[in-house]
Image: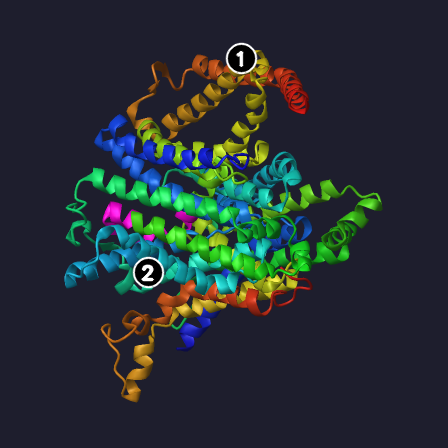
């Protein structure tokens, strides 16, 4: 996005994004997809806020759900207070309360944790996360114990005739907040402060020499990130109308890390891709297979090992070639590589699914279905077919990878020479 | 009261020694490779489950040997083919890799052995009470755990301080490049230390499995405590890890046994606090309820005020 100098083009992007958000419910109008888009909305804010830390400032937090959760709890409590006192505050400003709660706790805990960087910071954030999660079991008044804090979004003052009962109204509320937050976080990366965050990430020593306090930069980034996480938490409280202490624990903190990293932390757009993809996968895959968390874990490990730029990195790698029109030179190589990649993926998925069936669903007999395929999970033929598929795919991929790499480098070179002319 | 103190001390020592078995490998790996192994507690869990599975076929005792060997082998493979691949992307990538690994191991364990605890039994040979004190019995298996932990600790200490291998490992802790220059195969040392560390964790799992509960959540609940032990003890310091492990073991065990809240303490002074007074729940929480928080408070305090830890010689 940085290459867009044209002011009109710049604005056009945001207008287009807004139009897309407005149009989406007309395209995907079913109740289930509406709910999914709501979940995506606050997942996007949450993972972008996480990436302010990991991708932009280079600090790895294992306790980011604390600020998300505190935002949620504060919003739920505030909603209850407003409903009880009939205060003239409409629902759309409520996520701001979540954001302020996130900001407050980020300031409190960030003051302690941002004194250190690197692994020490990660461990402090983990400790604080565990601390707050353990506290949630003790302070039952605030966290509501096992049952959590439930609230109602329809009890507040009407906002232009809307009471936010129907899901579609909640969708537009979340979409509006989502767009505003994305814009704000994007603009943050363009400010001098956002640039200093990158400097602190890339070379903290030099940033200190230039005269900036790296601790201060980390602290401010942490607070801003806590604010947006709180907004996301507030939106989730409005959507679910209940907040339980499970949102604050190590699970969600780890999940936001998976989400952002799979999307790609080195690019602004990465966490958005990650949030959309993971939410869609979570909802659609969990219907098909009980082992979907294992796939998420596998995907994450693969990304860490082979594609540190994440999915966004893989996509944007092709941008110069797309701009210079040399992308089609890659098509034959990619076309060839797609076959073994599909074979390996299918083999892997079949191994996991068959094992899952044998281990978890053994009571249902050994006949199992994967998509349109039906086979006996214990038959040696099925097993040898699966293993053969996987091994053959792997070997073909190994053979093909130098060829694909060469085609890729050729295309890059051509794009460069075209650009130089 | 005396009964409480004696048994809490014994249990605290036991828990502390168990923590040390795990933390010793973790702290060695951390200081040597700079990798905070998130999956360390997962190897402990794998040890417990492997021990359980082996005990189904050939009994507890072969499992005590085989499970740590197996898990140690897996650990060495993870280092060789996983961590070493990720190493070029930096420390954050390594940390993330072990994090993903821990995530996957938990999912796999749930898939293979189910979400509910498995029935990992104490072997018949040790299924009696070691002694009776004040009408409370103490199981022999716990004594066995205590002795095993002490033996491993002494063995590790002797290995590191009295043998040539130990010398190279200690040198590689602080000056890996220099050790490499002198012609030692540092990557091999790394792989071995990683494998042995995982094996020790698995050993802890095998002996803790029957006494505690063998369930998929056992890694996630113990992992963060291990980091606390390593950080509080000081990086790369086995003695520090030993002291910190015992400290945390004792503190947690004693805290669980004390059922007193702030309100109870203030009541004789004429101050009555109820759930409805300001900060209500805070005053009513007993020390036993606060026990899970204590290690993390300790972690945060140590990282702020003494980043070197108790016995460490460099900052975390």
Q: Residues within 10 Å of mark 1 (few under 14, many from 20)?
A: few
Which of marks 1 and 2 precedes in the sequence?
2
> Which residue does the image show at 17% across and 54% down from the upper left?
A156
Residue A230 picture location, percent across and down: 37, 53
Q: Which stretch appears magenta? A: A236-254
Q: Secondary structure at mark 1?
A: helix
> Quick check: A338 above or below B296?
above
Q: Which residue is mark 2?
A: A137
Q: Residue at x 64, y 35 (%)?
A: B85
Q: Nearer the viewer, residue B235 or A252?
A: A252
Q: CA distance from mark 2 to mark 1?
A: 54 Å
Q: Nearer the viewer, residue B18 or B310?
A: B310
Query: Residue pushed farthest right?
Result: B182
User: What percent of the width, then of the height, locates residue B198?
Assistant: 59, 45
Report in which chain the residue with disc 1 lies.
Answer: A
Q: On the image, which quarter does residue A272 sit in?
A: top left
């Amino acid at each position: 996005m940085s290459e867009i100098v044209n002011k009109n083009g710049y604005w056009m992007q945001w207008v287009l994004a807004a139009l897309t958000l407005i149009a989406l419910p007309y395209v995907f109008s079913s109740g289930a997809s509406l709910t999914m888009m709501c979940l995506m909305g606050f997942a996007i804010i949450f993972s972008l806020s996480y990436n302010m830390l990991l991708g932009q400032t280079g600090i790895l937090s294992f306790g980011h759900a604390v600020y998300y959760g505190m935002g949620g709890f504060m919003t739920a409590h505030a909603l209850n207070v407003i409903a009880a006192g009939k205060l003239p505050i409409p629902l759309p400003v409520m996520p701001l309360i979540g954001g302020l709660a996130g900001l407050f706790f980020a300031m409190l805990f960030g003051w302690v944790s941002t004194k250190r960087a690197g692994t020490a910071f990660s461990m402090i954030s983990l400790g604080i996360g565990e601390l707050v999660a353990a506290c949630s079991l003790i302070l039952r008044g605030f966290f509501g114990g096992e049952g959590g804090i439930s609230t109602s979004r329809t009890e507040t003052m009407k906002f232009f005739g809307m009471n936010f009962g129907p899901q579609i109204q909640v969708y537009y509320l979340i979409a509006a907040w989502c767009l505003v937050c994305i814009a704000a976080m994007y603009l943050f990366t363009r400010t001098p402060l956002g640039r200093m965050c990158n400097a602190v990430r890339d070379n903290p020593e030099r940033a200190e020499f230039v005269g900036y306090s790296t601790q201060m930069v980390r602290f401010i980034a942490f607070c801003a990130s806590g604010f947006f996480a709180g907004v996301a938490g507030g939106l989730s409280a409005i959507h679910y109308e209940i907040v339980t202490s499970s949102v604050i624990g190590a699970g969600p903190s780890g999940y936001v890390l998976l989400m952002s990293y799979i999307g790609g932390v080195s690019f602004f757009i990465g966490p958005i891709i990650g949030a959309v993809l993971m939410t869609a996968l979570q909802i659609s895959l969990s219907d098909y297979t009980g082992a979907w968390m294992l796939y998420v874990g596998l995907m994450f490990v693969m990304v860490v090992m082979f594609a540190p730029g994440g999915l966004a990195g893989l996509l944007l790698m092709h941008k110069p070639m797309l701009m210079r029109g040399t992308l089609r030179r890659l098509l034959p190589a990619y076309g060839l590589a797609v076959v073994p990649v599909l074979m390996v993926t299918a083999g892997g998925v079949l191994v996991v699914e068959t094992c899952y069936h044998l281990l978890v669903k053994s009571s249902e007999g050994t006949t199992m279905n994967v998509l349109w395929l039906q086979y006996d999970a214990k038959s040696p033929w099925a097993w040898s077919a699966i293993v053969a598929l996987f091994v053959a795919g792997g070997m073909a991929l190994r053979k093909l990878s130098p060829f694909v790499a060469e085609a890729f480098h050729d295309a890059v070179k051509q794009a460069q020479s075209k650009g130089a002319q | 009261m005396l009964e409480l103190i004696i048994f809490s001390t014994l249990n605290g020592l036991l828990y502390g020694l168990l923590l040390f078995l795990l933390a010793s490998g973790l702290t060695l790996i951390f200081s040597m490779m700079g990798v905070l192994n998130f999956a360390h507690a997962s190897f402990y869990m794998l040890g417990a489950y492997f021990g359980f599975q082996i005990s189904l076929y050939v009994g507890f005792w072969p499992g005590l040997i085989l499970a740590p060997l197996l898990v140690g082998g897996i650990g060495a493979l993870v280092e060789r083919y996983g961590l070493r691949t990720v190493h070029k992307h930096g420390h954050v990538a390594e940390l993330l890799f072990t994090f993903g690994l821990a995530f996957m191991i938990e999912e796999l364990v749930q898939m293979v052995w189910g979400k509910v605890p498995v029935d990992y039994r104490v072997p018949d040979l040790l299924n009696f009470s070691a002694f009776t004190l004040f009408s409370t019995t103490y199981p022999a298996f716990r004594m066995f755990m205590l002795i095993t932990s002490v033996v491993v600790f002494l063995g590790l200490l002797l290995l590191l301080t009295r043998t040539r291998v130990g010398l190279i490992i200690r040198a590689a802790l602080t000056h890996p490049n220099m050790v490499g220059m002198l012609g030692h195969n540092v990557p091999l040392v790394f792989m071995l230390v990683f494998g042995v560390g995982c094996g020790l964790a698995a050993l802890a799992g095998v002996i803790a499995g029957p006494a505690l509960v063998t369930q998929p959540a056992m890694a996630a609940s113990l992992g963060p405590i291990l980091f606390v032990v390593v950080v509080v003890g000081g990086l790369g310091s086995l003695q520090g890890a030993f002291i910190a492990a015992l400290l945390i073991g004792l503190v947690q065990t004693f805290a669980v046994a004390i059922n007193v809240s702030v309100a109870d303490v203030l009541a004789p002074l004429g101050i009555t606090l109820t759930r409805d007074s300001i900060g209500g729940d805070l005053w009513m929480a007993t020390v036993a309820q606060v026990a899970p928080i204590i290690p993390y408070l300790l972690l945060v305090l140590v990282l702020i005020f003494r980043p070197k830890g108790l016995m460490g010689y460099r900052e975390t």
